[in-house]
Amino acid sequence: MRRSGSDSDAAGREGRRVAPAEFAELAGGLRETGQRQVVGITGPPGAGKSTLASYLARSLSPAPPVVPMDGFHLAQDVIEQNGLADRKGAPDTFDAWGFVNLVARIARPTDDAVVYAPRYDRSIEEPVAGAIPISPSNGLVIVEGNYLLLASQPWAQLNDLLDLCGYVELDDEIRRRRLIDRHVHFGKAPQAAESFVYSSDDKNAELVEATKSRASAVVQMDP
C-alpha cells in the first residue's frame, strides 16, 4: 500500500480501530501531500462501505468523488450465461482487470484528461458506464468495494495504488439483516433473500474478512 508520511507513521496506524470521524481526519490529512491520493474502503457485504464513503464525501471539502467497485459487475446476461447468477458478488462476477486498470489510471494520472468511472444501479441490477467523473483537480479520490485487499491477482495490484485503506466492521447479524432487507427491497422474495445471504454473501464475507489485517485501519460502524 502506498503510504503518505514516514514509514513509522504508517506502521503506527496499521490495523488501528477508529471511528468514522477519525478515519475522515486520516483521509483529509492526505491532501497535505499536494498529489493525487486514493483512499480505499473495504469490508464484507452489508457492513456499511457505501455509508462510510458517503460520510467522507460529506465531511471533506471539496467533496471527493467516490468510485464503487460494484460498477464493474459483469452484465446480468453475462453472469447468467456463465452460470454465476447464484454467486453474484463473488470475485469472478466482476471485471477485475477493468477495475484495477481504472484505479491505476486514477492513482497515477499521466495527463489532464477527465477519467470516467461506472456506477452500479441496483434498481436494474446493472452497471452504468461513464457515470462518475474524476477530474485532474480532484486531489483525493475514494474507492470502495469488497475486494480491495485480496491477495489473488489481479486484485493484489490494488495494494500499491491505495494510500490509505479502511476496513469497515459491523456485527455479523446486523450486517446479514441489512443485506436481507436490501435484497427484498430490490425484488427478491424474503426466503430467497435469506438463502442468498447465508450462502453466497456469507462466502464472500469470509473472503473479505481474511483481508482485514492488510487494512490501514479498522473502522467501527454504529449499528
Image (cartoon, grey):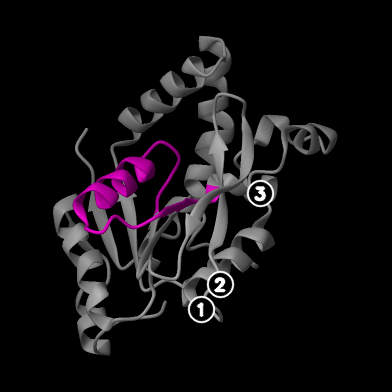
Residue 126: quarter of image: top right
Q: Which mark is residue 94?
A: 3
Q: Is residue 172 left or right of residue 19?
A: right
Q: Are marks 1 and 3 in contact (CB under 8 Å)?
A: no
Q: Amino acid at mark 3?
A: Phe
Q: Amino acid at mark 2?
A: Ala
Q: Nearer the viewer, mark 2 or mark 3?
A: 2
Residue 33: quarter of image: bottom left
Q: Where does the image place residue 210, in percent across and percent down from the top left? A: 45, 57
Pick whichever of labels 2 and 3 is earlier in the sequence: 3
Q: Are marks 1 and 2 in contact (CB under 8 Å)?
A: yes
Q: Is residue 208 above or below residue 148?
A: above
Q: Is residue 53 left or right of residue 55?
A: right
**Residue at point 62% right, 40% down?**
128
Q: Which residue is mark 1?
A: 108
Q: Disc 1 to disc 2, how far (Cα)?
A: 6 Å
